[in-house]
Each structure stands twice: as C-alpha cells, then as structure tokens.
Amino acid sequence: MSETTRSGRIDPIEFRQRAVALLPSLRERAREAEKLRMLPSETVSDLQAAGLFRGLQPARWGGYEVDPATYFEACVELGAADASTAWVLGVIGVHMWQLGLFALQAQEDVWGEDTQTLIASSYAPVGDVRRVEGGFRVSGTWSFSSGIDYAAWVLIGAVLDGPDGRGRREGRTLLIPKQDYRIVDNWHVAGLAASGSKAFVVEDAFVPEYRTLLTRSARKLETPGAAANPNPLYHLPFMNVFVYAVSAPMIGVAQGMLDFYLQQAKRRLQSATGPLSQDAFAHQRLARAAAGIQAARRQLRADLDELLGMAAGGSSIPVEDRARFRWGAAYCVDVSIQAIDQLFDVAGGFSIHLDNPLQRMFRDAHAMRAHVQNNVEKAAEAHGRALLGLPDLGGVL
C-alpha cells in the first residue's frame, strides 16, 4: 500500500463517541478478560473497527491525527468500563504515534501492507544490543509488553556506546518484527491482568539503522518522521505524550468507581448505620473524589492543548515547560488514586466480592500506579528542580 493512502479526518466529538459506544460491551467482558489475562479478541476487533488505535497514527498511513487531548480523553472514557482496555489503547496508540517519528522506510515496513498493524513495546534497556555494520544485533528478554499478543512488531529500548565506541552512551528505540521474537506467557498478576503485558525474547536479531530512533533526536524534536510531517502532533516531546498513555486510564478508573458507587449507594442499605446514601462520612469522601476527578480531566485537556499549541507555534518546548507538563500528568495520577482509595474506603464490605467491579478497579488502579512513569514523587521533583532552575536529573523528561 502506498504511503500516500490517507484516512478521512475525524471530528473530535465523534472520536470520543466511538469510545463511549464500546462501554457496555467492555463492562460485560471485563471479568472474563481478567481470567483470560489478555484482551478478548472481540474487544481488539471492536477497537480496530472504531478506528481508535489509529487516533494518533499519521494520516499518510490511514490515521486520524487527532489532537492528543482528544485521544487520551477517549482512554479516560474506556477506563471507566475496563482499565486494561484503556491501558492497552493508550500504550499501543502511543506506539502508532511514535512510529510516525521514525524514518519513512520503517513506517513502510510496518504499515505498507496493512495500516491496522499494531506495535507493542518494552522500553527498559535490559537486553544486549551491539552495533554491527548497517545496524544492530539484538538479544535478550524484555518484560511488561502490554497487548503484545495482538501486535506484529515491538519497540525496545537500548543504551549503547556511540558510533566510535567512545564518548557518551546514547539511548535508542529499536523496531523488531514478530518473526524475530517469541512471547513468554508470564503474566500472572493482581492488577491489569487483562492487559496481557507478557515478556518476549529476542535471539540474535538484526535491526537495520533506519529502524531505530535516537532518544537524543526525539528530545531535540529533530526526528526523521517529524521532518517529513508538518503536523505539530509529531513535533512533541516523547515523554510528555507517553505519560498520558499510562496516566489517563487512571482518571477513567476513578470515574468508573464514582459512577458505580453512586449506583450502589442509591439502592443499598448499610446494615449498621442505616442507608448508605445518608452516610455523612461518605458524602465528604464523594465530594473530594468527584472534585479530584474533575480536576484531573481539566488538567489533561489544558496541558495537552497548551503543549500542542506550543508545537504549532514552532516552540522547541523548553525543559521547564516539559517538566511542568510532566508534573501535570503525575498530578492526574495523584488525585485519581486518592479518589479511588476514598471511594473504596466507603464502599462497604460487598465491594470485596469478586463479582463486584469495585475490587477489580481498585486492584487495576494500584497496578497502574506502580508503573515507573506514574511515580508522582519523581515527576514532582523534576518540576521543582525546573522551577529552581536546576538541571533535569534524567529519565523523567
């Protein structure tokens, strides 16, 4: 398929409505998906049919190129029904965007025959990556690859010596096809079980240079893909986009807990203290939780709109702004997990039954909080250092 194949642009409201339309079926499948330890094939088909994976994908390859706030608001909507589905959509959707930063030949390799091809990842630089003539040799085991069962490619992180073997080490992301790795079914976890975040093994695979992306180039906003695509969407710092893949679903879980709690509270009695809906302690927790969720939704939209506006204006997006936006995503995590814990505290004993969605939401949310990029304290430190004019410690921005 030619790279000039284009998708029709989509109205942001319609994009979100497509996500909302899937909520009833996601709620119905959520418990079974957890037992399956991966998204049901029906769910992946629904996401594909709705075009949700293609939200951030380049238009030249059939994508919609929606603004990032709209994309991650769709992840919030899905998170209210099933955290794992929102998580997989967020993470894989970012991969579709990141591939748009690679050389066009790499994009052709992935989408030339099928523009619906999905990409998984594991960014931790844990394997053996060696420079050879024309590219790199890769071996090792990578973990936590969400949605990998439905992907045909993976992105892996690596840190290695520069071209001359001396000087500072450089970070790279490498793109590897399915025939060069095998999946290890080791995903037995307490939360986000349906995300299917399994490990994979690569054994002496060759990756040509053009199928790699220098971390330094991405930070400088000087990527091959950005040079070929004028849309400001592809002129954004990687970390400021990626963090919302793992933080936006948390807002959705908080919203889902609030919605479900309200449904239960209006019809259930609390045996020791009377009607649950008349519990003054619960009223206070509800007020705080609802305010936190609303604040997180506003923060997501405001920060991502401002970030995209800066890129559209030609800004290189200074480090202090990157740190501020990074903190904004962490703030969303912080207030959302507080809301989730407050709601679970007042939900009552029935909330621990396995047929009650609240206990799964609670477990899924705390699994999300464990992701390294949802470390609220690290993001706060980076923002605080930027406010004081101190250098970034690395690994956060």
Image: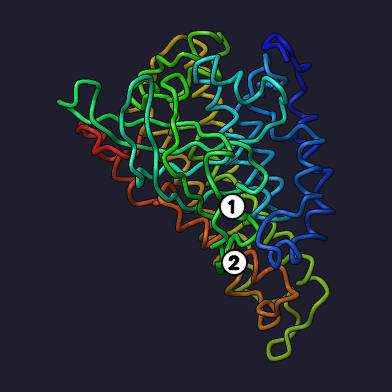
Task: Name the amino acid type tagged 1.
Answer: Ala
Task: Name the amino acid type tagged 2.
Answer: Phe
Which quadrant would the C terminus be assigned to in this image?
top left
The answer to whether 326 is drawn above or below residue 223 in the figure is below
Q: Which residue is mark 2?
A: 362
Which quadrant would the N terminus be assigned to in this image?
top right
Asked if the residue at tag 2 contacts the one at tag 1, i.e. Cβ–Cβ closer than 8 Å, the answer is no
Q: Secondary structure at mark 1?
A: helix
Residue drawn 34% across the image and 51% down it: 377
Is 85 in front, or is 323?
85
Q: Secondary structure at mark 2?
A: helix
Q: Which residue is mark 1?
A: 291
Is 121 in front, or is 91?
121
Residue drawn 83% across the image and 74% down it: 267
Nearer to us of marks 1 and 2 is: 2
Residue drawn 48% across the image and 57% down it: 369
Relative side of 365 to 209, left or right = right
Q: How many marks?
A: 2
Residue drawn 52% across the image and 12% down it: 312
Relative side of 329 to 388, left or right = right
Q: Residue 109: x, y in percent?
A: 60, 22
Q: Quadrant of residue 365?
A: bottom right
